[in-house]
Image (spheres, rainbow, N blue to C red):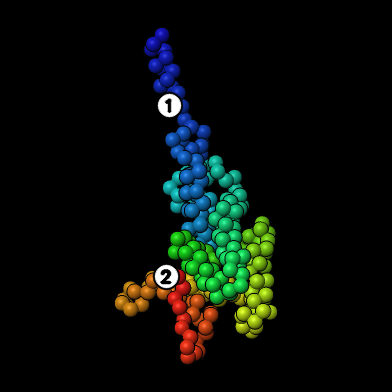
């Protein structure tokens, strides 16, 4: 009897798992997050259209069956990326326009800091945004709009227009170009700084130096400083 029970236990141990089903010891949420991060990396490097589920599996170090266990199709994975990785960051960036509504310089400074934090915390962000949002051939922008609309962007545009009407911002400024202008002033220097290893002075620049420069240009322009006025570094 004891021998039969032992044999039964051995057969249970030897029984193969269903294809793609994660082992019981694996944290399913961590495994799923790992696949999403692998997707973000590849989307930023080679584009959404050129990235297959098999490639994501290789990047994550798992089998294609494992990817299919969590995501039945590439479209389903892309929607998860948008809902769980892209949209929360869009919301966080737009929220600054709901704070300190009377001081546009404070708001734009906060936006610059949040944008830089996102770019430094998530290395895939700058390349993905340039490839899939700014580019005419990018597919991410339209899909994000289809799923979540323009509401968060419109909040920012309306707030800027309000500041202009109140005489707090230059009326010649185009509200719809604020984000892309700030992106260019922050992210492009951040990317370029990675290739400045041979220039000691440039290599010493920090992300906060880049933020300070961007805010100074946006808030004061490039003209000379007026007597009696000081340009404080953003905190």
Task: Name, please, the residue furthest toward the top.
Answer: 1
For numbered disc 2, what is the local secondary structure? helix
**Mark seen at residue 207:** 2
User: Is residue 227 at least partly visible in the picture?
Assistant: yes
Badges 1 and 2: C-beta atoms under 8 Å apart?
no
Camera-nearest residue between 3 and 29: 29
Q: Could you say where residue 152 lies in the image, as x and y percent from the top left?
A: 64, 63
Q: Is residue 72 above or below residue 101?
A: above
Residue ID at (47%, 64%): 117
Q: Nearer the viewer, mark 1 or mark 2?
A: 2
Q: Could you say where residue 224 lies in the image, as x and y percent from the top left?
A: 48, 90
Residue ID at (63%, 60%): 144
Q: Is residue 11 above or below residue 36?
A: above
Camera-nearest residue between 147 and 136: 147
**Mark seen at residue 130:** none
User: Is residue 196 at least partly visible in the picture?
Assistant: no
Q: Is residue 14 above or below residue 198?
A: above
Q: Could you say where residue 125 lies in the image, as x and y percent from the top left?
A: 50, 63
Residue ID at (45%, 38%): 26
Which residue in the structure is indicated by mark 1? Answer: 14
Residue ID at (43%, 22%): 11
Q: Where does the C terminus fall, quadrant-wise?
A: bottom left
Label 2 neighbourhood size at 10 Å, few (<14), some (14-19), many (20+)? Answer: some
Q: Could you say where residue 205 lies in the image, as x and y percent from the top left?
A: 37, 74
Q: Disc 1 versus disc 2: distance between alpha carbons? A: 53 Å
Camera-nearest residue between 86 and 217: 217
Disc with the residue nearer the chain's start (1 vs 2): 1
The total number of labels drawn is 2
């Amino acid at each position: 009897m004891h021998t039969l029970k032992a044999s039964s236990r051995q057969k249970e141990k030897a029984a193969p798992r269903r294809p793609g089903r994660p082992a019981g010891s694996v944290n399913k949420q961590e495994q799923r997050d790992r696949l999403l991060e692998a997707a973000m990396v590849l989307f930023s490097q080679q584009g959404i259209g050129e990235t297959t589920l098999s490639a994501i599996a290789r990047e994550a170090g798992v089998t294609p069956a494992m990817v299919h266990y969590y995501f039945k199709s590439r479209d389903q994975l892309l929607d998860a990326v948008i809902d769980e990785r892209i949209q929360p960051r869009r919301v966080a960036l737009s929220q600054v326009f709901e704070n300190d509504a009377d001081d546009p310089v404070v708001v734009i400074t906060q936006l610059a800091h949040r944008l830089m934090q996102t770019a430094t915390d998530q290395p895939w962000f700058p390349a993905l945004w340039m490839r899939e949002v700014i580019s005419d051939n990018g597919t991410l922008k339209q899909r994000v709009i289809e799923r979540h609309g323009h509401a968060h962007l419109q909040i920012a545009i309306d707030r800027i227009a309000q500041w202009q009407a109140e005489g707090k911002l230059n009326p010649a400024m185009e509200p719809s170009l604020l984000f892309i202008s700030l992106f260019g002033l922050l992210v492009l220097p951040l990317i370029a700084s990675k290739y400045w290893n041979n220039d000691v002075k440039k290599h010493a620049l920090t992300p906060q130096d880049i933020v300070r420069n961007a805010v100074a240009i946006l808030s004061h322009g490039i003209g000379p400083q007026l007597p009696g006025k000081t340009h404080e570094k953003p905190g």
